[in-house]
Image (cartoon, rainbow, N blue to C red):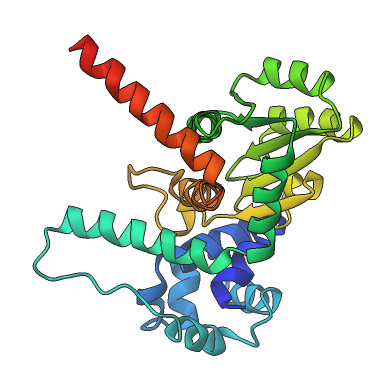
């Protein structure tokens, strides 16, 4: 397990001060190699002893060892010929994909694909930005001929969970894994014995604890939480992987091709 994975795994359980340290480390990995412990403490407005305790918390002996661990990670090297803004966004997306790809567990993906194939109905929950991802996944499943729907309204989530059946599947999408309305809905679905799949970023989150299977995507705040970019990129990568595995089924691929053909044909008639 890399130092990045260790920080992400424990992030939900960090104190406010520990999260400040974690955020700075994850967003400034390259520059930390030139810092001493006092420099880092000043940057995050904390003490050197807090930095040392943080290192211990993530199973690193000390600040020097943390720097060594960070240096060992392959880092993105931007092209000097590219304009800065293009370069920043390219680096952002490259890192999110690379980190998410490292977090994917084959067995979890296999289980997710199997459960979607065999569910009587699949309901995808997501609120806010995660709602767009939920709607996208629902549309893909519908086009494969599966009984699926996306729910992005918190009240409708409660309603759906109240009447959900054991042979139905819930896929819950939340970067933080702590969205209150989503968690409340899943607690109801859990009591109804529905299967729950989570797409999230944190292993110790409330969402992960409720889920039967979890797939993890890299959180955007670990790259840069001030850049105006798609915060769902890690989640979208996951649903691309899941969708690609599903369309390996000939029936699902046939349905996808058929719906694409008919939609394109309708669009031409409307022109």
Against 2, residue 135 (above or below) is above
Q: Kindly tell me whether residue 172 is visible in this rendering.
A: yes
Q: In the rendered image, which quarter is residue 145 located in?
A: top right
Residue placed at 49% from the left, 81% from the top? 37
Against 81, residue 14 (above or below) is above
Estimate the x, y position of residue 150 in percent, counting from the top left. Answer: 59, 25
Q: Is residue 23 left or right of residue 108?
A: left
Q: Kindly tell me whether residue 46 is visible in this rendering.
A: no
Estimate the x, y position of residue 214 in percent, counting from the top left. Answer: 69, 52
Residue situated in front as seen by the camera: 240 or 222: 240
Estimate the x, y position of residue 96 in percent, counting from the top left. Answer: 43, 59
Estimate the x, y position of residue 221 in percent, counting from the top left. Answer: 47, 52
Residue placed at 49% from the left, 89% from the top? 68
Q: Quadrant of the N terminus?
A: bottom right
Residue placed at 36% from the left, 76% from the top? 75
Q: Is residue 80 left or right of residue 188?
A: left
Residue placed at 52% from the left, 89% from the top? 64
């Amino acid at each position: 397990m890399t130092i990045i994975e260790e920080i992400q795994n424990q992030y939900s359980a960090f104190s406010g001060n520990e999260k400040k340290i974690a955020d700075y480390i994850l967003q400034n990995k390259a520059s930390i190699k030139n810092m001493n412990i006092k420099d880092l403490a000043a940057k995050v407005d904390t003490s050197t002893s807090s930095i040392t305790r943080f290192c211990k918390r993530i199973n690193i002996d000390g600040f020097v060892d943390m720097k060594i661990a960070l240096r060992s990670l392959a880092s993105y090297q931007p092209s000097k010929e590219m304009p800065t803004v293009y370069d920043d966004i390219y680096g952002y997306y490259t890192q999110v994909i690379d980190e998410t790809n490292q977090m994917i567990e084959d067995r979890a993906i296999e289980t997710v694909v199997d459960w979607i194939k065999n569910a009587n109905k699949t309901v995808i929950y997501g609120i806010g930005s995660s709602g767009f991802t939920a709607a996208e996944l629902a549309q893909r499943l519908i086009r494969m001929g599966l009984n699926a729907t996306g729910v992005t309204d918190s009240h409708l989530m409660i309603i759906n969970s109240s009447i959900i059946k054991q042979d139905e599947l819930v896929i819950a999408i939340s970067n933080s894994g702590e969205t209150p309305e989503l968690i409340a809905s899943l607690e109801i679905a859990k009591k109804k014995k529905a299967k729950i799949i989570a797409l999230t970023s944190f292993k110790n989150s409330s969402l992960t604890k409720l889920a039967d299977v979890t797939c993890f995507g890299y959180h955007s705040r670990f790259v840069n939480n001030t850049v105006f970019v798609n915060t769902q990129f890690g989640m979208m990568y996951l649903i691309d992987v899941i969708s690609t595995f599903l369309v390996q089924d000939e029936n699902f691929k046939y349905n996808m091709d058929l719906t694409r053909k008919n939609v394109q044909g309708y669009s031409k008639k409307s022109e």
